[in-house]
Image (spheres, rainbow, N blue to C red):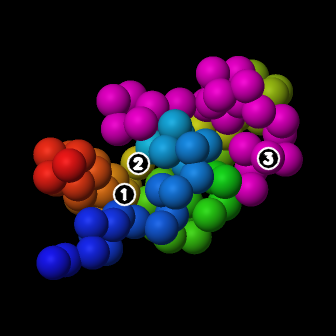
Amino acid sequence: MKNPIADLNKIFDSRIRLGVMSMLIVNHEISFNDLKQMLELTDGNLASHLNTLEQAEFIEVHKGFIGRKTSTTYSITILGKQAFKAHLDALEKMINKL
């Protein structure tokens, strides 16, 4: 019998990273402040999780300015979409076998 969790992606073990990816899969782009507010996180906590996703090349960071204010937004990469969908498929398969 195959290990039921073998196909789950370890990066998505965190509920915060799961939440970030869930929001990015349905939105073209989301700002740091919107993610922070929606997930009710501190700057440092969110930044740490976003860094993990960026290092895995699952998200892209876009830095710019709105007027004189800095603006940081995030979007999901093709690799990120593939990895997240594979993770969700693995979850679904695991659930359906129970």
Q: Is residue 17 magenta?
A: no
Could one spot residue 61 in this view of the protein? Answer: no
Identify the residue shown where x is 85% and y is 47%.
44
Given the image, on which type of amino acid does mark 3 rest? Asn
Residue nearer the viewer, 56 or 93: 93
**Image location of residue 76, percent across then percent down:** 41, 48
The alpha-carbon separation of the residues under discs 1 and 2 comes to 6 Å
Question: Would you name the residue on which mark 2 appears?
Answer: 76
Where residue 80 is drawn, which disc sits there? 1
Q: Residues within 10 Å of mark 2 (few under 14, many from 20)?
A: many
Tell me: 85 left or right of 55. Answer: left
What are the residue bounds of the magenta stretch? 22-48
Mark in the foreground, 3 or 2: 3
Q: Which residue is mark 3?
A: 45
- Drawn side of residue 95 relative to residue 30, left or right: left
Q: CA distance from mark 3 to mark 2?
A: 19 Å
Check the image and report above or below for 63 versus 28.
below
Q: Main secondary structure of the magenta part?
A: helix
Reply above or below: 1 against 7.
Answer: below
Element assignment for label 2? strand
The three-letter amino acid code for the residue at tag 2 is: Ile
Question: Up-down: is 33 above or below 85?
Answer: above
